[in-house]
Image: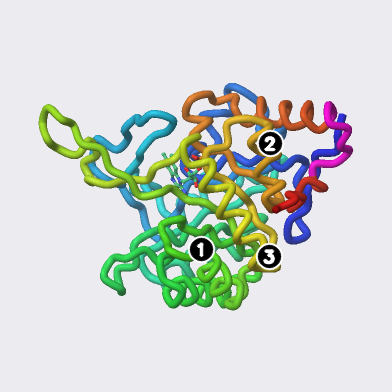
Amino acid sequence: MADLSVNICGIPFKNPIIPASGVFGYGREYERYYDLSKLGGISTKGTTGTKRTGNLPPRVAETPMGMLNSVGLQNPGIDAFIANELPHLLSCDTVILANIAGSTPEECAEVAAKLDQTDVHMIELNISCPNVKQGGAAFGTSCTAAAQVTKAVRAATKKPLCVKLSPNVTSITEIAKAVEAEGADALSLINTLLGMRIDLRTRRPILHNNMGGFSGPAIFPVAVRMVWQVANAVSLPVIGMGGVMSGEDAAELMMAGASAVQVGTAIVQDPYAPLRIIDELNDWLDSNGIDTAAELTGSVRAW
Ligand SMILES: Cc1cc2nc3c(=O)[nH]c(=O)nc-3n(C[C@H](O)[C@H](O)[C@H](O)COP(=O)(O)O)c2cc1C
């Protein structure tokens, strides 16, 4: 049995496998299947300053090797999250990453300030959402906007702050450096890639929102590449995700530079995926004579 524990920003995780934001809600649907304390952590559904109902349906579409979604940050708002969901999550004996978002830096800061008053372990700031003050382009697609929102949230909280990067950029390392300079404690990546499908019969986009986020095993090589680039460009710990389906995928993303790994779309296919991936990672470490998961991080021997 290998030692699966990892430490990120001084927070001990019993293993490096974390359900990703948006596919695990606030954990309640999954508790009927298994004990959430088996998980390394939980990244909760993106929560905003006030309740959001999300986009109109259809909001999901299948694609070969993945899916598209345009759920659109449906959530009950930060006050309801803190009152109704967080106390239970914090009793689950696992690390809770509160994933947050907003339409302005001020909204993100307000949400973070409220979480600062709670016992949540880490804040994960999703910067892939539209910035209404800058014409709707996502915060995460410009260094200036990414830096502004990170600065505002940093000023609002002393909690460990993990900024979740968008892959829909020309240079992910420039964004990573801009966010590091404004005081992020960790980075997580990748969020979904922007995609689109069309129904040939109706000639309408399948998603009501026209475009949506592409996730699943098809994006795994992009995630490996971006985690590797970012881990080499900054001094912050990186939480990797994007298409992880197996323990071997998790090991690969850790070799690329990730200290822990989030699992998203795999859970849509199989609610037990995180537990299976924990077991597979352990088996892979054992069969390769590796004592600790942590020693995988950044161990790729690049040419
Ligand atoms: C249905 C769905 C909802 C999502 N909602 C969020 C969200 O609220 N906040 C966020 O930061 N990422 C969200 N994501 C992105 C995932 O957390 C993850 O970054 C992405 O899907 C890539 O990982 P995967 O290929 O393992 O799914 C969502 C993804 C899916 C599929």
Tell me, yes or no, whether the highlighted magenta stretch contains residue 290: yes
Sequence-first disc among 1 and 3: 1
SS at mark 3?
Answer: loop
Badge 1: how crowded within 10 Å, few (<14), some, or many (20+)? many
Q: Residue 52, percent across and down? A: 33, 51
Q: What stretch is highlighted in magenta?
A: 286-293
Q: Are marks 1 and 3 in contact (CB under 8 Å)?
A: no
Horizontal side of 186 relative to 142 (left or right) equals right
Considering only vertical position in the picture, is 78 above or below 41? below
SS at mark 2?
Answer: loop
**Quarter occupied by residue 128:** bottom left
* Residue beneath disc 3: 236
Sequence-first disc among 1 and 2: 2
Mark 3 or mark 2: which is in front?
A: 3
**Amino acid type assigned to the residue bearing label 1 in the image:** Ile
* Residue beneath disc 2: 39
Considering only vertical position in the picture, is 31 above or below 10? above
* Residue beneath disc 1: 172
Q: Residue 260, percent across and down? A: 68, 47
Instruction: Measure the C-alpha gap from mark 1 to mark 2.
Output: 29 Å
Residue at the left extreme? Answer: 202
Q: Which of 274 and 290 is in front in this view?
A: 290
**Amino acid type assigned to the residue bearing label 2 in the image:** Leu
Query: Visible in this render: residue 45?
Result: yes
